[in-house]
């Protein structure tokens, strides 16, 4: 991990953030793949799956038999863990949804009802590759089902033997996924966005993925709605001299094991803590599982930023806008309140980001690449639309007659006012 002495927090955070941007060349490659799927459908998806995933499939759809077989390959404890995740997340999402019910405003003859309607259909991207992510099935499907989405589709890249990870299929079944397809990468996103012979187009695409998937979602957003830019994992830890350097180190390692393009960093005012964390990371990383990924990720993308004071650290955090932010310092609650830009804020030494990935009841599909400035985690809100139902009496319309006339005249749209006058002059 590189150690950076930060003189201007905003400028340094912006410089580090710039290095995570999606390159134009990757976007062009992504567009080419997606164009192939748009033009050739299933055959293109199958060809790209053979090319990128190393397996030639006969069919894209996961069968009911494959799901039944998956249950025989997992343990009761694993299924129990999935059910616990589902229960805790559903409880959290229902609490949000209930707040949105029954919203109505009445004033001077005008009544506006805010009706909550689910999105028609959703495609959930479940990453594969060098790891398996049944937890992401839970994070994507549960809020959709809580919202009342009628058709929930999941896609994930197949393994070398042409199958999907068994626990991922079990999680999909437990969480009520309606269709599951063996398709990953840009070709999978294209199938959801444009539709193919096997996969019907969806209304919205959600879920995290690598840079190709992130680029594909950006391209697809001109055709269907997408949730957010949710690319390779990011973790930033704000810690002061009171923090345990070993806890900071294991948390950085825990997120860096996702892939070699994860971004994990520490921001602190303490030179001593910085040196201790660096030493702990170097020591621990030698003997962990997936050590090759951990070491490459931290060497390539890891950093320790040393700022002059707490305010400078917070400026750095808000400019960097990390996916996950851990706050481990004195007065952690008051510091966390000053953070405006982060996908998820985890407060105190007992809230590691790894726990939030699974069973805390929060969602681990989070904005990356600086989009924490404008949104937070995936939630039930991503699967609903608020439809306004407006009812007006004649007296209520007369109340806005003059203002409507003035605005229609100012904008040169006089027929707008005539539609109102035709009713109020009766």
Image (cartoon, rainbow, N blue to C red):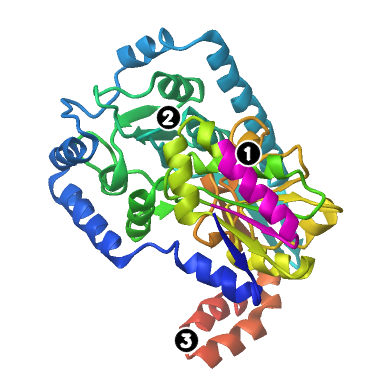
Depicted 403 relative to depicted 86: above or below: below
Whether residue 384 is visible, yes or no, is no
Q: Position of residue 40 (x, y in %)?
A: 13, 46
Query: CA–CA distance between discs 2 and 3?
Result: 57 Å
Q: Which mark is residue 250?
A: 1
Q: Residues within 10 Å of mark 3 (few under 14, many from 20)?
A: few
Q: Residue at x 45, y 33 (%)?
A: 290
Q: Which mark is residue 413?
A: 3
Q: Residue at x 33, y 53 (%)?
A: 216
| Residue nearer the viewer, 330 or 414 | 330
Q: Residues within 10 Å of mark 2 (few under 14, many from 20)?
A: some
Query: CA–CA distance between discs 1 and 2?
Result: 21 Å
Point out the tag, 2 or 3, that comes first from the N-terminus: 2
Say which element carries label 3.
Answer: loop
- Which residue is label 2 attached to? 132
In the picture provided, is 426 more to the left or to the right than 20? right
Q: Quadrant of the N terminus?
A: bottom right
Task: Indicate yes or no whether the magenta region holds residue 265.
Answer: yes
Residues at marks 2 and 3 touching, judged by CB atoms closer than 8 Å: no
Q: Residues within 10 Å of mark 1 (few under 14, many from 20)?
A: some
Magenta extent: 264-284
Task: Point out the frontmost of discs 2 and 3.
Answer: 2
Task: Indicate yes or no whether the magenta region holds residue 110.
Answer: no
Q: Quadrant of the C terminus?
A: bottom right
Q: Residue at x 59, y 26 (%)?
A: 86
Point out the tag, 1 or 2, that comes first from the N-terminus: 2
Q: Which mark is residue 182?
A: none
């Amino acid at each position: 991990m590189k150690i950076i002495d930060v003189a201007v927090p905003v400028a340094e955070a912006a410089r580090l953030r710039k290095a995570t941007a999606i390159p134009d060349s990757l976007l062009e490659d992504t567009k080419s793949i997606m164009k192939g799927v748009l033009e050739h459908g299933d055959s293109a998806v199958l060809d790209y799956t053979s090319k990128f995933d190393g397996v030639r499939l006969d069919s894209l759809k996961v069968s009911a038999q494959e799901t039944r077989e998956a249950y025989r390959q997992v343990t009761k404890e694993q299924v129990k863990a999935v059910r616990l995740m589902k229960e805790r997340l559903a409880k959290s999402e229902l609490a949000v949804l209930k707040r949105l019910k029954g919203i109505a405003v009445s004033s001077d003859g005008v009544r506006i009802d805010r009706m909550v309607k689910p999105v028609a259909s959703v495609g959930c991207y479940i990453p594969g590759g060098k790891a398996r992510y049944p937890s992401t099935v839970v994070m994507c499907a549960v809020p959709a089902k809580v919202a009342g989405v009628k058709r929930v589709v999941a896609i994930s890249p197949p393994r070398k033997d042409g199958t999907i990870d068994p626990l991922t299929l079990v999680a999909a079944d437990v969480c009520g996924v309606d269709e599951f397809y063996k398709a990953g990468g840009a070709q999978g996103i294209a199938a959801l966005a444009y539709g193919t012979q096997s996969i019907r187009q969806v209304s919205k695409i959600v879920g995290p993925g690598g840079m190709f998937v992130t680029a594909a979602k950006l391209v697809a957003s001109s055709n269907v709605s997408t949730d957010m830019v949710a690319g390779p994992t990011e973790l930033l830890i704000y810690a002061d001299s009171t923090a345990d350097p070993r806890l900071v180190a294991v948390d950085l390692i825990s997120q860096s094991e996702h892939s070699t393009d994860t971004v994990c960093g520490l921001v602190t005012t303490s030179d001593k803590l910085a040196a201790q964390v660096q030493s702990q990371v170097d020591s621990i990383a030698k003997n962990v599982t997936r050590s090759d990924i951990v070491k490459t990720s931290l060497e390539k993308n890891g950093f320790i930023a040393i700022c002059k004071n707490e305010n400078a650290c917070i400026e750095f955090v808000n400019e960097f806008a990390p996916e996950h932010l851990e706050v481990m310092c004195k007065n952690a609650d008051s510091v966390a309140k000053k953070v405006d830009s982060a996908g998820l804020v985890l407060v105190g030494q007992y809230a590691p980001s790894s726990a939030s990935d699974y069973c805390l009841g929060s969602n681990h599909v989070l904005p990356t690449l600086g989009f924490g400035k404008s949104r937070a985690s995936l939630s039930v809100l991503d699967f609903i639309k608020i439809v306004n139902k407006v009812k007006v009496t004649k007296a209520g319309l007369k109340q806005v007659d003059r203002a409507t006339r003035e605005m229609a005249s100012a904008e040169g749209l006089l027929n707008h006012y005539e539609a109102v006058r035709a009713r109020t002059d009766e």
